[in-house]
Amino acid sequence: MASIETGILMAIATGPSKREVWFPEPAELFPGAQEAAALRVLSRDLPSVDLTQRELCDLELLMNGGFAPLRGFLGRRDYESVLNRMRLGDGRLWPMPITLGVTPAQAEHLNIGQQVALRDEPGDLLAVLTISDVWEPDLHAEALAVCGTEDATHPGVGRLQGTKRTVYLGGDVRGLKPPAHFDFKNLRFTPAELRRELARRGWRSVVGFQTRNPLHRAHLEMMVRAATHVGAHLLLHPSVGMSMPGDIDHYVRVRCYEAIRPYFPPDLVLVSLLNLAMRMAGPREAVWHALIRRNHGCTHFIVGRDHAGPGQDARGTPFYPPYAAQEAVARFADEIGIGLVPFQEMVYVKNRVQYCSLNELGPKDQIESISGTEVRRRLRENLEIPEWFSFPEVIAELRKAFPPRSRQGLTLFFTGLSGAGKSTIAHVLLSKFRELGTRPVTLLDGDIVRRNLSSELGFSREHRDLNIQRIGFVANEITRNGGIAICAPIAPYAQARRQVRELISTSGGFFEVHVATPLEICEQRDRKGLYAKARAGLIQQFTGISDPYEAPEHPEIRLETTTLSAEDCAQTIILYLEREGFLS
């Protein structure tokens, strides 16, 4: 992988001194009109790779120079060097592996030197990759190097553990068109456009602020202090690509950013959206964010207490030490060419009626605080959020996105062995919800889905996972639009169920219901004779006999159908939903 060698020199401030930094121009990644036309014709006969959402975000920043000095997806030498020492093979600082994955079946037909068409989900051609490397990476080692943990509750680890694209392609890309964005066009700047806009405004010192969340009063106080501290203007540069499962979608967040603009001092802030797929990799990611902001024209970068951290692991321990991200950026700030602006957590001090950082507190100060979880609870239960915490305009936007639970959509996701009673309970619930008439309700029964959505699928693990993905996709759309989805597949694998939970939890309520009927009872109920055929070897890959069932460890509801009738089970679920506020 070569770097981009064309560019412009600019002097930027890095604390008290100045140094020259090479800002790359992405023009050479895009061919001229004649070559582009030839590539489009050629692409009709090229093998194609449909990019994931993460890869789409990465490709956009590769093509527009946001990931300079990269000019393509990492080859094996650079990839291994990045994992081991946060540097490309030639020694330049780069902390994050930017990779393109394909399935082993796809890789069988791809060779070094071959060209591949890179397409988005609708099939539009975005770029052509010339393959320099094809290899099977150690994804376990990647998770440990990038995320620093093997805990699958870390979103980066969970993604790597669940991916089917276990072969990587490396090589330079030739961009034909960037991914399309039809929202907030006035707020989307490429790095080159943003640097020109900063120069047009005469902003010589610019402090960048990364966020993936709505902003409240503490954030504004911190940003204004940071800009004042270094004598700089402020670039509010939120990530609007992929982030943490459960995060508020970027449409809501951007409306919140627009709503608080009047609260900033005049001519202090510029908002620009960054289509970045975050990895939530803490200190390593903070260094990456600083490099990206340098490429966008920032001279300084704010790094908070737990920058790009995903919270706590399965044991309740933070994945990363509190100020590790600040320490990482400080270590590389001069090499990056950016000034670090570290900040401690800002808290509201009741007796002072103002926000202060933790290091400013005295022994008699009275601290008020509300966690993100508590904010979401108050929104969902339509409770008051104090004025000292946020702005009325932001709360109004959030209340539109978080209606009371009684108006939210929800998914009941049943799982259990064949014959456990899932379908019977689901049909009882379908009648009960239709009787209530408060929301539209849809039943996605395992057999019905197999006939209508997944008739071409077999029962390999890959096909079972794909079947669950399809059920999850449909259930998510139902939930997002305020309906009730009742899903009743076997869903034997924990990873597939977790992925569905992560998808749907951003749209409304998600409740895993384990119908925990023992195998021997299911065999006794064997109305279709399936267990007998499986025992005789006539049916292969049958869950509970020749294929495993991974029982849920922490379902919202666990039902014992050996002692409860289907109507009793349905009533148990309805009472649970009433207690949780989803049924009024």
Image (spheres, grey):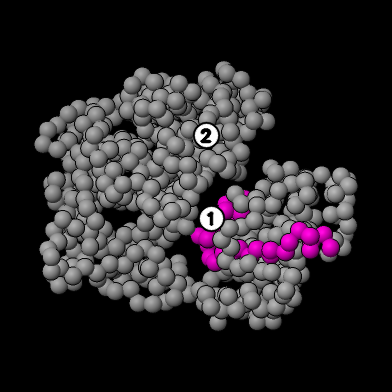
Which element type, helix, strand or loop, lies under badge 2? Answer: helix
Residue 184: x and y in percent read 41, 53
Residue receiving disc 1: 502
Residue designated by label 2? 139
State the SS at label 1.
helix
Q: As shown in the figure, which amino acid type bears the numbered disc 2?
A: Leu
Residue 558 appears left or right of 19: right
- Of circles 1 and 2, the one toward us is 2
Q: Amino acid at mark 1?
A: Glu
Badge 1: few (under 14), some or many (20 or more) residues near its Cα, within 10 Å?
some
> Compared with residue 76, is residue 313 higher up or lower down, i.e. above or below?
below
**Residue at position x 52%, y 20% from top?**
132
Left or right, residue 415 beside residue 498: right
Verify whether residue 409 appears in magenta: no
Q: How many callouts does the rendering have?
A: 2
What is the span of residues highlighted in magenta in the rendered image? 496-524
